[in-house]
Amino acid sequence: MYPFHYLRPTSIPEAQQQILLDSEAKFIAGGMTLLPAMKHRLANPSHLIDIGHLPELDCIEKRDAYLVIGAGTKHMTVARDPLVKSNIAGLAELAILIGDPQVRARGTLGGSLANNDPSADYPAAALALNANIVTDQRTIAVKDFFQGLYTTCLKEGELMKEVQFQIPLQSTYVKLKQAASGYALAGVFVAQYGSNEFNVAVTGVGNGVFRWTDAENALSKNKAIPVLNHDQLMEDIHASGKYRAHMTKVLLEKALTQLTR
């Protein structure tokens, strides 16, 4: 690990000033991605600005048609919060499936979304729940937020403050875990907004999270669920694209049975 300066701001305005100290300064909250990268000398920030303790970023509340969760909220908090369970059950189900107890105790919602790992869980929830990502500079519709492998539209130094999830009638999340990491070999988040209106977001099978529009259209017309085109899916030592395509359909079918319980 390369040397760095550690800063611990007491407010968002102070954090905003500290990020301007150097072009290589980085925010850190849970550190689940940044710290391992630093240990392997794959990242070399000049300053680490610790925002993980700021109360403004750790909140859960209902605002009209949205459940609003602070970007610094830990996975375990999301999994256990009564407001999350009663309004977006699928989000609580998702959070308890992330990693292991240590990761759930330290990792944050904002960190997961900003990293945009192609096998991460929260991006699927954000996409299926028509989320808005609120930063210190703007509000970003989720359809514009994810921009490919480990890439988002966040600018350097932009601080994510909260995520606004549109509350559905029902929701659920199911995934097939990669045994060692806990990441999704395939994960499906389903949010129902009308009698025949479903949002289906898929993670773990491609170069990034995506809405499975063919499945959404099939569900809206009470038709059979199609199979994904496996030629465009991820291939690695854990699973083939063909296997991921098959399992995505299986997981969606399982998710739909959970919605009707």
Image (cartoon, rainbow, N blue to C red):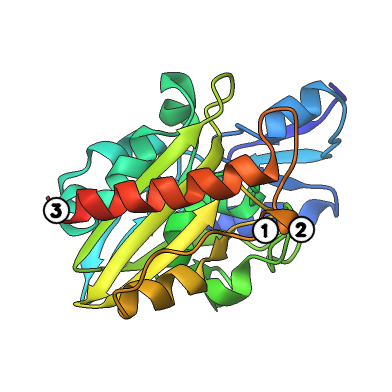
Quadrant of the rendered structure where residue 195 is? bottom left
Q: What's the distance in space between the residues labelled 1 and 2, CA to CA?
A: 6 Å
Q: Nearer the viewer, mark 3 or mark 1?
A: 3
Disc 1 designates what residue?
Answer: 17
The image position of residue 37, as x and y in percent, is: 77, 30
Disc 2 designates what residue?
Answer: 20
Looking at marks 3 and 2 on the same chain, the residue that comes earlier in the sequence is marked by 2
Q: Quadrant of the N terminus?
A: top right
Identified at 15% across, 45% down, the residue is 82
The image position of residue 42, as x and y in percent, is: 86, 32
Q: Mark 1 touching mark 2, by CB under 8 A?
A: yes
Q: What's the distance in space between the residues labelled 3 and 2, CA to CA?
A: 40 Å
Disc 3 designates what residue?
Answer: 86
Identified at 34% across, 73% down, the residue is 223
Residue nearer the viewer, 196 or 28: 196
Residue nearer the viewer, 112 or 226: 226
